[in-house]
Structure formats: structure tokens, C-alpha cells
Image: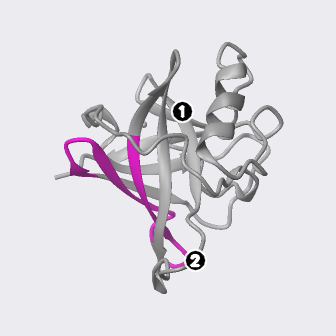
């Protein structure tokens, strides 16, 4: 998905230590596979273009590299559905220094995405509604479900344009 992603991912304030769910049986969306470039908002002046690579890892999982190049992070992403909300669970699996070390806290992001006229819009889970201090999946899921109908459940949109299809 916001993954995705979110966009996603560069938001330090939307990191959770537990997943919403470990289940992932929803197929990946082939429309989001490929190389994407971040489209800055009118008031943003990035130093260099940021790119995100979204690859299919399995039938139900993505491998996401964001931003590509120096300083990039690698995520395992998988489409999930919690209550009435479809989104993507993202798990940090490593960086240019290597994989997340065994024994380190697992770090998760949750994002939604929408494809609109060739652009990918990714929003991250709003920590004002679903507190990032929640430490277990049950409490996190309960807070998520409490706000599932709220239009502000996902915030901080990031837009990307596709540069190339994944092979």
C-alpha cells in the first residue's frame, strides 16, 4: 500500500513497538510496485529528490527501500485489514548498516495509500488518535478500532509519482 506507506516512513513520530496484526493474507497491489519519486509540496524545497522502491517479496509482502541511496531504510510491508480499514503494516528490517540487530526492539509503521491519476498518496497513522506509546498489539488494535471511522485516522500525506515499473 503506504505504505506506504508513510511517507511514510520518514516520520519518527509514527513508530510503534508492536504490530497491529501479524496476519498477512491479503495479496500485494501490483499497481504500487516500482520506483517512485517524492513530489514536494509547494512550500517544500528538498535538497535532492527522494525515491522509494516498492518490490514484491511474496504474494502477500512488499520489500520497500526508502529513501533509496545513502541513508535509506528497508521495510517489510504487508497489506492488512483492521475492522473496516485497509492499510499497510510496515516493519523496519534494516538500513545501509545492515539488518536490525537481534534483540533490538521491533519497529512498525502503519500507513494507508491511494492511487490518484498516476500519483501515489501515502498517509501515516495519526499518533494523536492512536498513541505511539501503546506497547502491545491488543491495545494498539483497540485504539485503532475506536477511531476507524475518523477521517483523521491517517495524516501527513506524502505524494509520489511513478518513475518506472518494477521488473
Specify the farthest residue to the bottom. 97
State the colouring used for the structure image.
one colour
**Vertical placement of residue 63 versus 164, above or below:** below
Q: Position of residue 26 (x, y in %)?
A: 30, 31
- The residue labelled by disc 2 is 104
Drawn side of residue 123 relative to residue 152, left or right: left
Specify the farthest residue to the left. 167
Drawn side of residue 124 relative to residue 63, left or right: right
Contact, CB < 8 Å: mark 2 with mark 1?
no
Residue at 45 percent across and 56 percent down: it is: 52
Circle 2 residues within 10 Å: few <14, some 14–19, many ≥20: few
Q: Which of marks 1 and 2 precedes in the sequence?
A: 2
- The residue labelled by disc 1 is 112
Q: Position of residue 103 (x, y in %)?
A: 53, 79
- Magenta region: 56-78
**Vertical placement of residue 96 versus 122, above or below:** below
Drawn side of residue 69 relative to residue 40, left or right: left
Can residue 3 be spotted in the picture?
no
Specify the farthest residue to the right. 128
Magenta segment includes 132: no
Q: Main secondary structure of the magenta part?
A: strand
- For mark 2, give the secondary structure: loop
Q: Position of residue 1 (x, y in %)?
A: 42, 37
Can residue 130 be spotted in the picture?
yes
- Of tags 2 and 1, which is closer to the observer? 2
- For mark 1, give the secondary structure: strand
Q: Nearer the viewer, residue 25 or 71?
A: 25
Q: Nearer the viewer, residue 35 or 28?
A: 28
Magenta segment includes 59: yes
The image quadrant that residue 107 belongs to is bottom right
Amino acid at each position: 500500500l503506504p505504505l506506504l506507506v508513510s511517507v511514510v516512513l520518514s516520520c519518527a513520530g509514527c513508530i510503534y513497538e508492536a504490530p497491529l496484526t501479524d496476519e498477512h493474507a491479503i495479496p500485494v497491489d501490483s499497481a504500487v510496485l516500482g520506483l517512485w519519486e517524492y513530489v514536494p509540496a509547494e512550500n517544500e524545497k528538498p535538497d535532492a529528490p527522494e525515491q522509494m522502491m516498492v518490490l514484491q517479496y511474496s504474494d502477500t509482502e512488499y520489500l520497500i527501500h526508502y529513501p533509496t541511496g545513502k541513508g535509506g531504510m528497508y521495510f517489510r510491508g504487508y497489506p492488512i485489514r483492521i475492522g473496516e480499514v485497509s492499510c499497510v503494516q510496515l516493519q523496519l528490517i534494516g538500513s545501509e548498516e545492515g539488518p536490525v540487530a537481534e534483540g533490538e526492539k521491533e519497529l512498525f509503521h502503519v500507513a494507508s495509500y491511494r492511487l490518484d491519476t498516476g500519483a501515489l498518496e501515502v498517509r501515516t497513522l495519526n499518533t494523536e488518535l492512536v498513541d505511539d506509546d501503546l506497547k502491545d498489539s491488543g491495545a494498539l488494535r483497540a485504539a485503532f478500532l475506536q477511531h476507524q471511522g475518523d477521517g483523521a485516522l491517517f495524516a501527513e500525506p506524502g505524494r509520489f509519482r511513478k518513475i518506472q515499473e518494477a521488473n
